[in-house]
Structure formats: structure tokens, C-alpha cells
Image (cartoon, coloured by chain):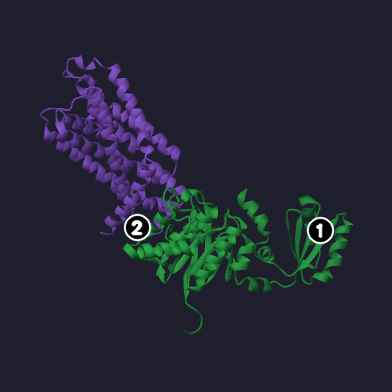
Chain colours: A purple, B green
Amino acid sequence: MTTVRQAWVIFTRRYLRELYRQPVVIFMALLQPIIWLLLFGALFKRVSEIPGFGGGNYVTYLTPGVVIMTAMFGSSWTGMSYIEDMQTGVMDRFLTAPVGRGALTAAMLAYQAVTTVVQSVIIIAIGWGMGATFPGGAVGIGALLGVSVLIALAMAGLSNGFALLTKQREALIGASTTLVLPLTFLSGAFLSLSLVPHWIADIARYNPVNWAASAARLAVGSHAAWATVGSYAGFLAIAVAVTAVTATRTFRVYQRSM
Amino acid sequence: MTGEAASVIEADGLTKTYKGDVRALDGLSFSVQAGTVFALLGPNGAGKTTTMRILTTLSRPDRGRASVAGLDVLARPGKVRSAIGSVSQHSGSVGLLTGRENLTMQGSIYGLRGRDLRRRVTELLGALGLAEAADRQARTYSGGMRRRLDVATVLVHRPTVLFLDEPTTGLDPEGRSDLWSVLTELTSAGTTVLVTTHYLEEADQYAARIAIVDRGRIVAEGTSAELKAALRGDSVLLELDGADRAAQAAKVLADLPTVIAAATDGSVLRARVADGPSALPAVLSSLEAKGITVRSVTVARPSLDDVYLHHTGRSFHQAEGIALS
């Protein structure tokens, strides 16, 4: 109970206020995906005419993929906030107070969930403006937001744990940039998996980004296969639980190294 | 109460080695009485911060034990955290939050709420001279204000023991004396304060007791007066033409039987002798014989600098130079 209350205190009294005072952090992470959306939307305009793509509008195909990519990209940087806290003494302040380490993780994930929802809504709006359609309607879009939050939290847990282990900006930048793009391209975020080489399709099956991208696309499409969406979401939820627990345990490793 | 007052902080044989065989602590022990300011004095790298980190539950020693407010820091870190307030070397306050918001968040974490919390926050901001700046973001504060905010924030839950790691580093003289008057006031209300500092003058002036830390151990401990009184003799300070000359002079004086110890600090040579006035002629003539010009001479009772020199074999500033290089 205390952990939940403390997480709520840190989330509302710190993170939400910081976000309100520096909303630019939401938009910085948006710049790149917007460029991707515009660029890829134009570049691969006719890609959806290739047999096997199922016809339709490429922007409709692309938008859920970019939502997922953005969620993952933005949250891969959350560890930066921990590193900054280490350097400004804020981390020590929390760790010398009777704050459950789980509360620190939970507050950070709650903050990440909020920024992800805002970012996803903006991308969906831009995609819609470019002609994307969402036959799944409000329910589908709600499910897309949910899936984007799940992949964001899984990535944020990973990023936080990594930050606690390495304590270095450079290491986190390196890990984030080497992980995010390959994971995106080894998924169906940009191209239908029926059109990519077999080995990529095989890898994609075990790639959480692909689970998210597939679930997202199914959810906003017509006649969503909810059982499939649900099982992907379930896998993602397990990934969130694993990375969140790992990040929380990593506080111990961090303290041992001090 | 019989005999000595209870000790609120106990460190017993703390030993810690970091990766790469860097021995930070080497059997460090001391204890602090309730309601006093106790200073750990030593150059950078002596082991002060590691000691603070262990006592505030951030780190664990390889060997040894420690307790704070009667609680074992290794066995009951959670309870210790509720009893202490800790200001690390870096600020620890959140820059984008106002002073009031920083205190309010801290108080909420400890379970304070509603009117009690608001009243406590306002009271502390006032007590630390931050009433006017209370609703400005902490990142706009000056160094001294930020430090006072740090102290106010960790006081919100009324801790019985306060830890401050180098609280006055980087502050101007006014900021330093302001902060010290706050700390002294706290002890009169019963709070126990442990500070680390590398300012000799501060420890001398404000701390009830001082422990000199050198290479991970406590080499001397007592009140400033006790530490100085334990040194026999006087201190002779010679001003010479530059550091090279001072080093040369130190070698000459080391050979004199009346000189107990000698060390340089820039162009100043600091020598301890049994009796200042009677040793002076021999000191001066031996330097003159080597052609070393003395610009000025002072004879004084031993200072904390001499205490440090006596126990570590190095002058305090020299030790700092080594630690930093």
C-alpha cells in the first residue's frame, strides 16, 4: 500500500509537474517519427499495391507501425532521467528516504505511459490527416494506444535497468540506437512480413516490437482478430512485468557499486 | 542518565575496497554523541564520502558494522532511513520544482499530508530564509539558497540525525556562515549532525568534535582544543621565496634536533618545535647558512593544520594536492 501511495506521490508531485513545465520533451521524441511518416508515406506510396500487401492505403498500414516505433523510441531514453538523477543527487535523496524501490519504478512507468499516450494520439492524428483510415473505430484506436503503452513500458524498464547498471549517458545512447532500429526493421512495422525474407519473418515472431506492431495493426483494422491481439498483448504484458521487476532489482546492484 | 551521553552514530571497523583494489576505508571507527555537530575532516579521497554513504544506507561495507539512532544500518536500513535526513554532495533537490514543491513531495513520501504538511513546509521555508523564494523553481536559486533548500527538504520529517556531505563546498563565505548557524541551531534542538568538510577553519570553529580522516582511517579525534592541546610545543611559520625555496628549507630544518616536524604549503614552511622563542635563533641561522632568505616569521600555538601534519606526516593542503592529482 505504501509503495502505491509513494509511487503516486512521485508520479504526480514530480513527473507530471516536470512534464507540465517542460512539455517540449514530448515533442522532441515526435520529430523523428513525423519525418518518417511523411517520408515513408511518400516514398512507399505504391508499396501497398504489391500483391500480398492486401491492397489499401500505405499510410493506413504505416501509421500503427510508426506509433509503435515512437513509443519504443521515446521510452528507450527514460534511463537518461535516472542518470541525470544520479548526477544531481536526486537519486541519493530518494534512496536515503524510506521509498520502496518498486515505487520509483512504478512512478517512472506511469510517467512513461502518459507521455506515450500523448505521443501516440498525435501520430494517429497526423496519420489520419495524411489519409490513413481506422476501420476499427474508437475501440481499435483505444487498443492501439494500449499496445503502444505496453511496448513503451517494456522498453522503459529495460532502459532504466541499463541506466542503473552503467550509470553513463554514452552507454545508454549506444544501446538505444543499436537496439531500436534493428528491432523495428525486424518487424512488420513498415512492411508486411509476407514480403520479407523468411529469416526476418522467423526472427520477427520472437520480436516484441513485432508483437506490438501486429497487434496494433490488427486492432485498428476491420474485423479485428481480438484473440490474436489479446495474446500479443499478453506477451507484451509479461515483458513489461519482467523488465519492471528487473529494473527494480537493479537498484541493489547500483547501490552495491557505490 | 549516568556517565556519558548515548552515542547516536557508531561506526566500528568499517572497511571497503572498490573495484581495482582501491581501498576507500581501512578499519574506520568513531562515535558521535547526541545533539552535537561532529565533523569528519580530511582531504578529497580520504574516505569521508564512503563513510557517509554507508551510514545513510546507500552503500555497504565489506567488513565492520555501523548503527544510527540505535539501529543497525545493515540489518535495518528501512528504519534508519526513516530516522535520518541526508544531503549528498550534489544538491538532490529537483530543479523544475519550486522550493515548496520539493519540500511537499518529500513530506508526502514520508506520509505527512494535509494541513500538517503545509504548515511544516511553510515553517521550514521560513526558518531557512526561503519564504520569499518558496514559489520559485529551485533551478533559479543561488548556490547558498539551494543548499538551504536541501537542508530544509531533508528536515521535513523531523529526523533525529542529519548527514551532510561537504555542505559548504562552493558556497561564498556568507553562505557558509549562514548554513553553519542553521546547523548549530538544529543541535540545540537535539538533532545530531554529522558533516564532512575539507575546510579546516570550519571544523575548528563550528564542530563540537572533529575526527581527522586519512587514507580510510580516523587518525585523531577530539574537540578542536583537545587536539591542539595534545600537541606539545609551538608552531613556527616561515614565509619564503616560493615553493622551491620552502621545500629546500624544509630539508634543512628536518635535520635540526629542535624541530619535531616540518612541512610546506606553497611558499610557507610550517615547523613544529618544542619551544618557539628559544628554537627560533637556531632555525633562522641554519637557513641563513644555506643562503635561504626568510621573508617573515610567526610563532604560534599549534593550529588544526599542525594537528593534521602531526598525525599524517603531511600538511593538509599538500594532502589535498596529492588526492586531487
**Residue at mark 2:** A99
Q: Residues within 10 Å of mark 2 (few under 14, many from 20)?
A: many
Q: Is residue A220 above or below residue A239?
A: above
Looking at the image, can residue B133 be seen? yes
* Quadrant housing residue A212: top left
- What residue occupies the far front of the structure in this picture? B132
- Residue A182 location (% of width, % of height): 32, 28
Q: Which mark is residue A32?
A: none
What residue is at 28 percent from the left and 30 percent from the top? A123
* Residue B150 percent across, percent down from the top left: 47, 57
Which residue, given by chain and number where applicable, does mark 1 sit on? B252
The three-letter amino acid code for the residue at tag 2 is Val
Relative to A233, is B181 on the left or the right? right
Between B38 and B202, the one nearer to me in the picture: B202
Count of marks placed on residues: 2
Residue B146 percent coordinates (x, y): 50, 54
Q: Is residue A191 above or below residue B198?
A: above
Residue A256 in view, yes or no = no
Chain name for mark 1: B
